[in-house]
């Protein structure tokens, strides 16, 4: 239990966010309050504004601290505290809604500490027990296996290189101690900004308690107000930062394999795609491009001229993304090692010498990315790639992974010892944040040496805030159906943890994939933030054409579907940089009060109005789909339209191998384009709006720009307003993309028969769907509908064909 002398510091960094630092080891006494130093957080954005002033009221042992719409209520005798919405007790005694209630918080005196692992390492030193009311759901918590709701799980926060991981593996590579709590359809957030090794018991050992336990001396707790999950996510990103805009090419198809060794291998891959008319925007190259696994080198035998190869691939519309590992080979005369040693950039042992381990380079030493000067040094090293024309980088092994150490020492997983030194801090404290510094360096490096482009940085590991620097892939999954299914809640969970750009290896990394699995995986990945086929050394070939023509055709269609969706996906990506709403969204984000929706993790949303329900099981040719409130038109493969279903129910989707079930919600306009061999610019020459008109009309969004670089862009809102037998469609734009030719059409579902379309170049019905072509720079179109025919027909197939 707590004592009267425990220290708690309250601030209000942002509206709707209260920060409560619990420091049970920093004893207050009768002489005063201990000095609590400022903290250098790896998670918080560096430009966080100064917090709001606090309003404090005291009555005996009771203390209320209010700011920005939240209040902390503390009993100074018992130490119990809670956070409620509102400005403290009103005159009538009424209070806001209780978000968080601390049942217990404490540090352990050394004598009480259990001898876990070793007497020197108390892995559960500081605790906080929060009330976990019955029925509350706990979303997020970073990269995790299991369903979206983590209630009933015990989670460890210790970034781990697990090869391969399984559907029960914990921890994985990314640690984000942030959860969105859903209770009765309302949301709030709890973020504990501790990179220290930590454990969270989510109402498992104690069914009504959420128990946090850190190996560090304090718990730095943020309580974030809702009421919607999207509000919690926005507040979390206001604290920890928004992801930067990816280049368009990174949203296109990517091919990777551990085993491509040479420029010749990659040339053949690109040719393989082009020969079969498969879209492709990037190839990734794994560790074999290096000279003896020495970072920032290229084997001359494998890549005689890297710059020339980058240029050659670029002419085919393909970018090259090389892997970079943090471990530096210890080798006298190797300039990277010499600089690191001379600059004192390396992680040290508890005794003070440079720590030596083994990764792919052997022996290997580790840059200390937790120190700003080391980040700056590593950023400078990116000149090597930037000069070769490289625009994307794949940061691997940055947990950091370490296969073995020179002397056996205490650690957990294949990494550095707990007591290794990062300047004045121990590895136990900063381990989880190692990848943040490494990826920050990559972004800073490209910003410096290639300021005209948007760098694409992919990372395996990360801590809260990693989204400012890099996108995340979910590491070493397996080529199994269970991993295909797992990818959806994993990616959605990362999205709910502030990481909007995340994806799993398509086809599965470890083990041999099959044609059917690969085809279904490509379909499921249509809404991944990025689509990278990747496989481990020694596994069966996994390029789209390795399983016969029928499978190749299905994959081609899935990739073409992806490319047709790019205007929408790019718009979602741009939205993510402002709202933190992920590209692939769990239903819980938009239907938190609908339990069936909130717990659904075999489907996802792309925006509020497009539902994707891939087949995730071998041999299955149909599946159940949950449709939340609203009316949903089946738009399978974005090509087969109808029927329309009422929401709030499960429906059966027939999905033979070539079919991806998709549904468009009434009220939604979706911007799509034509398939292409690769992306060029996000100024869409052919733009089509796929519209499901609702009783009141519809809304659609589109963001367009050059697809790369930093010049502005144009945001378009397409608004359809229905009044009686008339539907007026307006287009509102903001910003500029420069002039370019755009041919626009609309495909409208869910309307009665149209008699006239003023402002359109032409209109016609195709298979019961109204098709409008639009003149250049159109502003308004008005549709006159057959009177009395303005009810939703229930099945778009029944809309009469014909037209003018
Ligand atoms: O020890 O670089 O997760 O994607 O292909 C394995 C080889 C190191 C792990 C990555 C994987 C990559 C592999 N790497």
Image (spheres, rainbow, N blue to C red):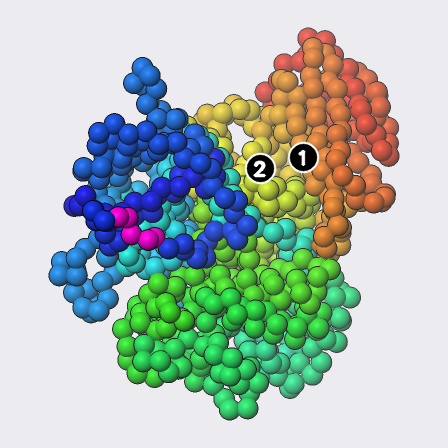
Q: Which residues are magenta?
A: 32-36
Nearer to me, 52 or 760:
52
Main secondary structure found in the magenta portion: loop
Q: Residue at x 65, y 75 (%)?
A: 384
Q: Residue at x 28, y 48 (%)?
A: 33
Nearer to me, 695 or 41:
41
The correct choice, above or below, for 663 with respect to 558 in the image is above
User: Residue 197 lies in what quarter of the image?
Assistant: bottom left
Determine the residue located farthest toward the front in the rendered image: 31
Query: From mark 2 to mark 1, how far is it between C-alphas?
Result: 10 Å
Q: Which residue is mark 1?
A: 701
Q: Residue at x 64, y 56 (%)?
A: 250
* Left-right relation of 218 to 193: left
On the image, the x and y values in percent for residue 211 come to 26, 46
User: Residue 688 lies in what quarter of the image?
Assistant: top right
Q: Which residue is mark 2?
A: 607
Q: Are marks 2 and 1 in contact (CB under 8 Å)?
A: yes
Residue 99 lies in the magenta stretch: no
Mark 1 Cα within 10 Å, few/some/many (few <14, many 20+)? many
């Amino acid at each position: 239990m707590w004592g009267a002398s425990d220290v708690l510091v309250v601030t209000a960094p942002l509206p709707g966010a209260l920060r409560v630092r619990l420091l049970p080891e920093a004893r207050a006494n009768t002489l005063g309050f201990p000095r609590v130093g400022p903290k250098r957080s790896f998670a918080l954005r560096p430009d966080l504004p100064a917090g709001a002033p606090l309003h404090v009221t005291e009555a005996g042992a009771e203390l209320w601290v209010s700011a920005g719409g939240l209040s902390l209520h503390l009993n100074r005798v018992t130490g119990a505290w809670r956070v409620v919405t509102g400005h403290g007790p009103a005159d009538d005694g009424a209070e806001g809604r209780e978000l968080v209630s601390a049942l217990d918080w404490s540090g352990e005196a050394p004598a009480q500490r259990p001898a876990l692992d070793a007497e020197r390492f108390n892995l559960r030193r500081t605790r906080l027990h929060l009330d976990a009311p019955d029925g509350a759901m706990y979303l997020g918590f970073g990269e995790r296996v299991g369903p979206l709701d983590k209630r009933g799980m015990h989670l460890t926060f210790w970034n781990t290189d697990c090869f391969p991981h399984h559907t029960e593996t914990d921890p994985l590579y990314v640690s984000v101690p942030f959860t969105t709590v859903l209770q009765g359809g309302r949301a709030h957030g709890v973020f504990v900004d501790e990179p220290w090794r930590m454990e969270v018991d989510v109402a498992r050992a104690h069914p009504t308690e959420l128990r946090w336990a850190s190996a560090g001396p304090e718990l730095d707790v943020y309580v974030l107000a809702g009421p919607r999950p999207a509000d919690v996510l926005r507040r979390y990103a206001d604290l920890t930062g928004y992801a930067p805009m990816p280049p368009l090419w990174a949203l296109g198809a990517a091919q990777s394999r551990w085993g491509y060794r040479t420029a010749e291998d990659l040339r053949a891959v690109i040719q393989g795609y082009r020969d079969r008319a498969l879209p492709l925007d990037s190839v990734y190259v794994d560790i074999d491009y290096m000279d003896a696994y020495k970072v920032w080198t290229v084997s001359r035998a494998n890549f005689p001229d890297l710059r020339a190869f980058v240029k050659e691939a670029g002419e085919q519309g393909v970018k090259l993304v090389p892997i970079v590992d943090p471990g530096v080979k210890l080798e006298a005369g190797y300039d990277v090692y010499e600089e690191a040693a001379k600059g004192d950039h390396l992680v040290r042992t508890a005794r003070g010498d440079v720590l030596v381990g083994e990764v792919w380079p052997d022996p290997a030493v580790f840059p200390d990315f937790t120190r700003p000067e080391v980040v700056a040094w590593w950023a400078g090293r990116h000149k090597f790639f930037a000069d070769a024309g490289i625009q994307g980088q794949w940061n691997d092994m940055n947990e950091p992974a370490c296969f073995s150490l020179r002397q056996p020492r205490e650690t957990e997983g294949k990494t550095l010892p707990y007591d290794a030194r990062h300047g004045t801090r121990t590895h136990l404290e900063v381990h989880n944040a190692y990848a943040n510094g490494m990826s920050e360096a990559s972004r800073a490096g490209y910003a410096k040496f290639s300021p005209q482009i948007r760098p694409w940085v992919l990372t395996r590991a990360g801590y809260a805030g990693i989204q400012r620097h890099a996108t995340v892939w979910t590491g070493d999954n397996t080529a199994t159906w269970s991993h295909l299914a797992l990818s959806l809640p994993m990616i959605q969970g990362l999205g709910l943890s502030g990481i909007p750009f995340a994806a799993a290896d398509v086809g599965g990394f470890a083990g041999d994939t099959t044609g059917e699995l690969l085809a279904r995986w490509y379909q499921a990945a249509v809404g991944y933030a990025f689509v990278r086929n990747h496989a481990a050394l020694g596994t069966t070939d996994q390029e789209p054409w390795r399983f016969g023509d029928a499978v190749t055709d299905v994959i081609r269609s899935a990739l073409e579907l992806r490319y047709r969706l790019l205007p929408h996906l790019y718009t979602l990506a741009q939205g993510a940089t402002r709202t933190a709403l992920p590209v692939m969204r769990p239903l819980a984000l938009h239907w938190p009060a609908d339990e069936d929706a909130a717990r659904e993790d075999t489907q996802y949303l792309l925006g509020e109005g497009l539902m994707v329900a891939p087949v995730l099981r071998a041999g299955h040719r149909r599946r159940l789909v949950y449709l939340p409130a609203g009316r949903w038109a089946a738009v399978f493969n974005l090509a087969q339209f109808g029927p329309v279903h009422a929401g709030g129910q499960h429906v059966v989707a027939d999905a033979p191998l070539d079919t991806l079930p998709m549904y468009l919600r009434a009220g939604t306009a979706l911007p799509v384009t034509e398939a292409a061999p690769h992306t060029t610019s996000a100024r869409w020459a052919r733009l089509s709006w796929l519209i499901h008109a609702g009783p009141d009309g519809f809304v659609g969004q589109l963001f367009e720009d050059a697809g790369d670089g930093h010049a502005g862009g144009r945001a378009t809102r397409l608004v359809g307003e229905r009044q009686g037998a008339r539907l007026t469609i307006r287009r509102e734009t903001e910003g500029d993309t420069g002039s370019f030719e755009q041919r626009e059409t609309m495909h409208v579902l869910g309307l009665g028969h149209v008699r006239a379309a003023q402002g359109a170049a032409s209109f016609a019905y195709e298979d019961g769907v109204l098709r409008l072509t639009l003149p250049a720079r159109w502003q308004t179109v008005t549709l006159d509908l057959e009177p009395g025919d303005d009810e939703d027909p229930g099945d778009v197939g029944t809309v009469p064909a014909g037209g003018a």
